[in-house]
Image (cartoon, rainbow, N blue to C red):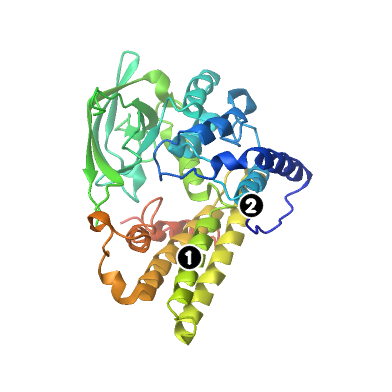
Amino acid sequence: MVEVPDLDFGPSARAVAAEARAWLDAYAEVGLDFVDMGGLAPKGAWVDLVREHRWLCLNWPTEVGGRGLSGLEAAAVDAEFRRAEVTRPRLGMGETLVGPAVIVHGSEEQRAHFLPRILDGTDRYCQGFSEPDAGSDLANVQTRGVVDGDELVVSGQKVWTSWYWDATMLFALVRTNPQAPKHDGISYVLVPLQRDEDFRPTNGIELRPLRQISGEAHFAETFLDGARAPLFNVIGGLDNGWKVSKTTLGNERGGSAATQYLRFETALHRLIERVQREGKADDPVLRQRLAWAHTHVQLIRYGGLRTLASLVDRGDPGPSASISKMLWSEYDREFGELAMDVLGADALTFGDNDGYQPTRWHTQFFGSRSSTIWGGTAEIQRNIVAERVLGLPREPSV
């Protein structure tokens, strides 16, 4: 069993944690070989078992297969899975981003339709928010949505579409009222991403993978030419998408707040093990940098708890999510550079592994360069903190 800090989240959290621990005592062995595929829809006996016993989508309402847990209760359950050294599967952006938006802003009929399809794996989502001229300035989206009978016809371009490779749905922001002010006239729509027999997208959608320096393609450019979605798929109503998107973005920045530090802690422990194996543990400068990393992992941990508290008190993570995003993303970038320094000359090559593939450390380093960009740049997060936490005047428009 892994040592996990024993944080008391209250009597209800203690009760559900005890239930999770008893269940894991009986079933954890099934999940020992489960590997998170980093965005691919999770499948297999462990996922089916976790779904059957309702340990997926913990915060979702019980009537659609969730457990209706609070953030504190869900954090207590995740701690038990961590203690048992098994992964609690996630259902990608459908669970963490689309689901919360539908729960908060969807009609009863939309909740009854979309949430079960996410839970059983029928619908798998990729994101269509950023555009070539609307990244950090997300409200500047130009992709158009035109009402045609009982459908919305969508045309335009998106970029940095993540989790596209096996998606069956695209959740997108589109401009449905060009005459409205920038933050108005935007709609949040769930666009079907049908696939042909070769699993290529249809419905007027083209996905072009963006090759990264690692050789992988975690993102794609998305071109929409007359893609159609039923008006039923517009969440929160036409021209009300900015409000809905704030729920999605808040969950993107604040989701898994209490357990996010664990991946950084695991990476740090692996790096320390490498330092020890290579006889570098006596280097005073390196020891100081590793101590810095340990300190920041703990700051990320407690910052996550603060974000979780905001979720519990307010129903959304608030500006604390921006503080958390700045902290972990900038740490991630610095840690990637530390790992490269530990590798030394080995950082200059990928090694002799099959196909000249990047090692874990190279992949971490390459990926960390984008951490301060996606989900809202570090500069945007600082503006949010300045205005909503410190009460400073808004940045003047250019």
Q: Residues within 10 Å of mark 2 (few under 14, many from 20)?
A: some
Q: Position of residue 97 (x, y in %)?
A: 47, 38
**Residue lying at the far top of the rendered structure:** 149
Q: Position of residue 249 (x, y in %)?
A: 46, 44
Residue for point 59% across, 42% down: 29
Q: Earlier in the sequence, mark 1 or mark 2?
A: 2
Q: Position of residue 163 (x, y in %)?
A: 35, 40
Residue 392 in sight in this render: no
Quarter where residue 193 is shown? top left
Q: Is 134 placed left or right of 117 in the picture?
A: left
Q: Position of residue 96 (x, y in %)?
A: 49, 39
Residue for point 47% across, 24% down: 117
Quarter of the image that includes the N terminus: bottom right
Residues marked 1 and 2 touching at CB (< 8 Å): no
Residue 69's place in the image compared with 340, above or below, is above
Residue under label 1, please give it. 270
Quarter of the image that includes the C terminus: bottom left
In this view of the protein, which residue sits in the foreground, 296 or 46?
46
* Mark 1 vs mark 2, CA separation in Å: 18 Å
In this view of the protein, which residue sits in the foreground, 182 or 374?
374
Residue under label 2, please give it. 83
Residue for point 34% across, 58% down: 363
Q: Secondary structure at mark 1?
A: helix
